Amino acid sequence: MYVAVKGGETAISNAHRLMADRRRGDRNVPALSVEQIVNQLSLGVDRVMAEGSLYDPELAAMAVRQARGDLIEAIFLLRAYRTTLPRFSNALPIDTNRMHIERRVSATFKDIPGGQLLGPTFDYTHRLIDPSMAGDEAVADPVKRERPTDESCPRVTDLLDGQGLIEADVPSNDDPGDLTREAIAYPVGRDIRLQALTRGDEGFLLALGYSTQRGYGRTHPFVGEIRIGMVDVEVDVPELGFAVCIGAIRVTECQMVSQFKGSTDTPPRFTRGYGLVFGQSERKAMAMSLVDRALRSDEFNEQRLAPAQDEEFVLEHCDNVQATGFVEHLKLPHYVDFQAELELLRTLRREAEIASADTPMSEAAE
Amino acid sequence: MKKPSLPAYNFAYLDEQTKRMIRRAILKAIAIPGYQVPFASREMPMPYGWGTGGVQVTASILGPDDVLKVIDQGADDTTNAVSIRDFFAKVADVATTTRTTDATIIQTRHRIPETPLTQGQIIVYQVPIPEPLRFLEPRETETRVMHALEEYGLVHVKLYEDIAQHGHIATTYAYPVKVEGRYVMDPSPIPKFDNPKMHRSPALQLFGAGREKRIYALPPFTNVISLDFEDHPFKVQRFESRCALCDAQDVYMDEVITDDRGGRMFVCSDTDHCETRRSEGYQGAGLPQHGAAKADWEAAQ
Amino acid sequence: MNSDPILSVRKLEKRYGNFIGCTDISFDVWPGEVVAIVGESGSGKTTLLNCISTRMERSSGEIRYRMRDRRYPDLAELSEAELRFLMRTDWGFVHQNPADGLRMQVSAGANVGERLMAIGDRNYGEIRRRASDWLERVEIAATRIDDMPVSFSGGMRQRLQIARNLVTHPRLIFMDEPTGGLDVSVQARVLDLLRMLVSDLSLSVIIVTHDLAVARLLSQRMIVMKSGRIVEQGLTDRVMDDPSHPYTQLLVASILEN
């Protein structure tokens, strides 16, 4: 006798128990500490903070551990926590001009005021698996430079702007929108677009940025400047009448100098694509700046033909938490809908059989 | 290194401002039946596509005295239904039930209970794609205009094409409806079998789409008409078999494969309906209804 | 012929920044009349057609249309809903490339039936009957009714596009080089069909073409454009036989040479 399947609750709790066991793995191996993850898997932690839109290395590291190293799952954990947090205030815009620079490169000028600084980069390493990674060999201290107290590192785009060679960076006092608190209505402003991109999936943006380089919405980009380092976060305190620094965060900024444009009113000048992400992630910041510029095609009367130029397409699909949820929901039961399709298919086949039985051979042969 | 501060959560998970925002969207949705109201969907601790819209709607309307029922595919015991029910039991400490008649709020994925809903009950549908025109026109900017101007010809083009190609309207679930003669609405992926239950239902019907950030509603006693042609009228599926457990007919059935020799049987998709009938003394044949297993069983008798 | 024009254009101008798309355009179209707008590419004729059919926003000027209820509003006064309703009932637009005017993923029958369904027809059998009537009128076998347009030749697709436009008995049709994408051998058949339908249904037509032979065959009146302006307009036979503007003389001479 058939009995409807029961025991969902037990199945779930047993599954979770097994998952916790696998997560911990061999009990004879010491458990990972949050400090180890923050220190030694810091780029993974950075990605989780960037796409989770929450700057908190310890929580991100906990999420990475809880997710067994699945970064999209970790991002999801961080997002679901972030959404419950109260908003006290909006920070002032961070000033990357005053960044404590750890890395700074420009592809457009050989030398720039303040100089180029390679910083902690994989660039120019040979990608050979290092045998020392199997153990815990001593690592030498880094070489440190003296930071000149009066050092000025103006952004390359500001230098171009000073000469009117690039579209002006127009400051705005408008409150930026918040796509986590408002539903998106297309077309959106650049504030919402940049928010969506900075939270967007690194792999998706990388592929889109890459597609613009291969001709699907070309923008003729040059890396004006990439800078990575710590910036202060300041909040206006109305009671005090001045801004108070509440901490510092590491960010990566990429300013792409792109295809110049002119019109009857304005002489030709370069246009901008902008990328900014939490933590150290040059790949993401660069991809973001390419896609940002591609999405500005309407502003420059460029024909929108490529996927990277299609705002609805890019913004609706760049969020990996949304994407993974919807793709993976296909494994939930769908048997009610499947049953409906099955019944219809059987009806159609029955009718087809009757029809073919009724058809004289001469007609069938036609 | 400092110890991370551990989070604490509000009644029914969402903070009160968020609940108010969602309730405003719900009120607007009730005021314009069938119209998709954009709302600032929050990130929920379950994945998008797994009921985040329904969960947010339920969380926003849930009070301490509510009795909650959660079903998926008609059943209270499917894993996702269990998981969502446990979530609310944990974060809101509300009473839960599997009895349709006892529930004040029913959250559902893919079905409407067989037991008719009554005045005062609220049914919350989980919606994956709220836009009924989405697969005819992918652009939100264009579908918004089509709704605003009541340009719904394209929906009938799809139905026409079904009949031309298959001889039938081949849409079997998520079958589009027209609400109060105005908005074309996606009823969520319920089988079209359930569509007539929406028409003039005394219960309040709320639809939440989390990933797509839309809420829509059918106030009690709203006219909900499934789209069709005069000469190809809307018809619901009919099952020839009776439920093998409770002998019910004219209900939606799950097909259960009993062996690898074509043995199949049909049982109620709505587990509460089935259990209730059995407790009232109804009993089905309890045997395979198709295939070799049926012959074996009959031979053994 | 009715004594009121169905459409009148006054001082119409379209600018793209400082560039002039078309300017100082004034003319009338009368019920049942075919007006050809001719000129070389870049003369502004397609810009003009797009402005009149409200597919493009004009910069200034007036476009009035005689509604079925005899009102005669400027098209700019109509709401988007009214305009869209006009476009799917009272007007037609035949694109040069049939793929721009057809739904390539649905059957020929659905393509023709779409406008009927858009205005509320809800009888499948009736929609199908009218679709198959129209397929035959444009010389497509009714047996092809359930085939996809992708399986049709270029000439058939163009005839399908025409049927799709005419099914609601529109009063005004815009055509943009309707035979431009077709082989010469196929062009003649489509032109013949157009000429017959236009006279059977007493349609008003504004047709843009660079081909004076097409204009001569279909139109009663002709507007010659150059650099965004009208250089000459008049009865087609008169303009062709006795062109007054030097540019028109050049155009006419160039086809006579062929």
Image (cartoon, coloured by chain):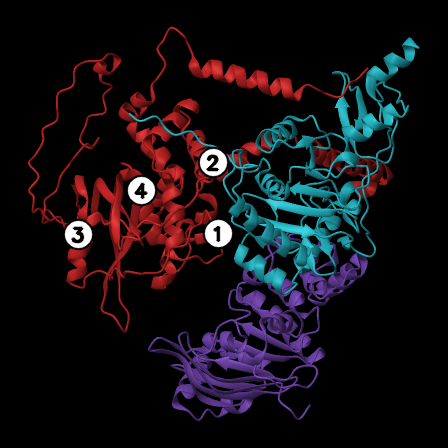
Q: Chain of mark 2?
A: A
Q: Quadrant of the C terminus of chain B?
A: top right
Q: Is residue A17 left or right of residue C13?
A: right
Residue with the mark numbered 4: A277
User: Is there any visible trace of residue B57 in the rendered image?
Assistant: yes
Question: Of the residues tagged 1 and 4, which is closer to the observer?
Answer: 1
Chain corresponding to purple in the figure: C
Crowd class of label 3 (few under 14; some 14 to 19; many from 20; radius 10 Å): many
Q: CA distance from mark 2 to mark 3?
A: 38 Å
Identity of the amino acid at label 1? Glu
Q: Earlier in the sequence, mark 1 or mark 3?
A: 3
Q: Is residue A239 left or right of residue A88?
A: left
Chain corresponding to red in the figure: A
Identity of the amino acid at label 3? Val
Q: Assess whether mark 2 and mark 4 are in contact (beta carbons under 8 angstroms).
A: no
Residue with the mark numbered 1: A182
Question: Of the residues tagged 4 and 2, which is closer to the observer?
Answer: 2
Q: CA distance from mark 1 to mark 4?
A: 21 Å
